[in-house]
Amino acid sequence: MPGRPVQPPGQGPAGVGQPPIPPPGAGQPPAPLPGQPPAPPPGPGQGQFRNDQGPPPGPNGARGDFNVPGRPGYVPGGFRENDDVRDYEQVRRDRREFSADGRTYYREPGRVIVQDRNGYLIRHDENERFRELDPRGYRSERRGDDYVSFIDRPGGDRIYTVTDDDGRLLRRYRRFSDGREVVIIDNTYGGPPRPIYDDVVALPPPDIRIPRERYVVEYDQADPGLVYEALTAPPVVAVDRRYTLDQIRYSPDLRARMRSVDIDTINFDTGSFTVTPDQARRLSVIADAINRAIRANPQEVFLIEGYTDAVGPDIDNLSLSDRRAQSVATVLTQQFQVPPENLTTQGYGEQYLKVNTQGPSRENRRVTVRRITPLLQQGQGGNQAPPR
């Protein structure tokens, strides 16, 4: 694809901020994880915590090194319960640069960006979107080396997110009011966290044998049937095995095995990650398609990808694109009741320009939606190629 590539850098600290917790007594503590016994009473450094008290330490002090006054890259006031970052100039002001392990890190509210090998990688707080959806009901607690957070959803269901001590997503699942559980994302089978370049899967580009307009659907020109088809179709070529969410996020030729919908009706203003009300209304068709797919299979997962034009520094474009993807995911849930646990987001900056220009381009400031369930192999037909 056109555009300046961003090479996958090495992995740095992956966690971004600490989740805000309402005062004790609000809500209930998380239930045991699927297949695990109840957690023991919290010991020193464990249990529920408030973000304004500072992050609790990890097993080797890892959490204690994260966004703490006096530590490298500290962001004053970042990630507290009353934060509402909407202005990208505020993001820039709060950004802090520091070096560790031979790499350069940039910490900003809700994000950490790593520079290595002449490129950038962004990781975001996996819980930020859920805190935004339910800032008072969101809760989290320490479970051994992991953190378990949850929010309650209409109908009595509860969404759990499990992250490790560095904030990497391990598992997300839904517990229904009748006690049934559905695992949405399981990133644990891949083993311990690896340097990010080890999560890049080298594959040949897929041999696309369907019309281009069905492979990448232009949202403003498509009828609802075509949108739904793209978001429920199997891979365009056979997928030989299961992949982790991290591998999918960082491997373009792997993602390219799935069709996508290019939401060209959402064109952000320069330097903005806000979805305006008139543009939000245009998401109804894709929201209906996603909701219909999830009703048929509660394990469906959709990746919302954010992109920018080529104007401005790479680091700003990467941060903006990640926030744009999250903004669209939030709108889909808040206005169209798309289950938040079935969505995941990632920004790619200016890596894949739709219009090959280095100048301003609203077409390049866009969001793409892609079904990734068959790559995660959570649903049916994950390793089957379509008939030709």
Image (spheres, grey):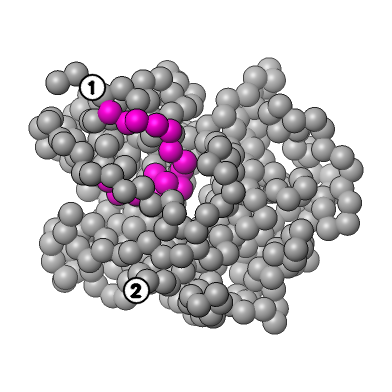
Q: Which mark is residue 386?
A: 1
Pointer 2 residue: 118
- Res 120 → quadrant: bottom left
Q: How many marks?
A: 2
**Residue, x 61% and y 55% (percent of image)?**
167
Q: Residue 84: give x, y in percent of width and height.
A: 55, 62
**Residue, x 43% and y 33% (percent of image)?**
242
Q: Earlier in the sequence, mark 1 or mark 2?
A: 2
Q: Residue 253: give x, y in percent of width and height.
A: 27, 46
- Whether residue 147 is visible, yes or no, is yes
Q: Residue 297: give x, y in percent of width and height.
A: 45, 21
Q: Which mark is residue 276?
A: none
* Foreground of the two, 108 or 336: 108
Q: Is residue 55 left or right of residue 365?
A: right
**Vertical side of 289 occupied by 56: above or below:** below
Q: CA distance from mark 1 to mark 2?
A: 38 Å
Q: Residues within 10 Å of mark 2 (few under 14, many from 20)?
A: few
Query: In the rendered structure, does residue 249 fall within the stretch colored magenta?
Result: yes
Look at the numbered disc 1 and give the secondary structure of its residue. loop
* Foreground of the two, 386 or 162: 386
* Foreground of the two, 89 or 45: 45
**Residue, x 43% and y 51% (percent of image)?**
199
Residue kind at label 1, given as amino acid type? Pro
Q: Is residue 377 left or right of residue 100?
A: left
Q: Quadrant of the N terminus?
A: bottom left
Q: Are marks 1 and 2 in contact (CB under 8 Å)?
A: no
Q: Residues within 10 Å of mark 1 (few under 14, many from 20)?
A: few
Residue kind at label 2, given as amino acid type? Asn
Query: In the rendered structure, does residue 360 fall within the stretch colored magenta?
Result: no
Look at the numbered disc 2 and give the secondary structure of its residue. loop
**Residue, x 87% and y 48% (percent of image)?**
42
The span picked out in magenta is 238-253
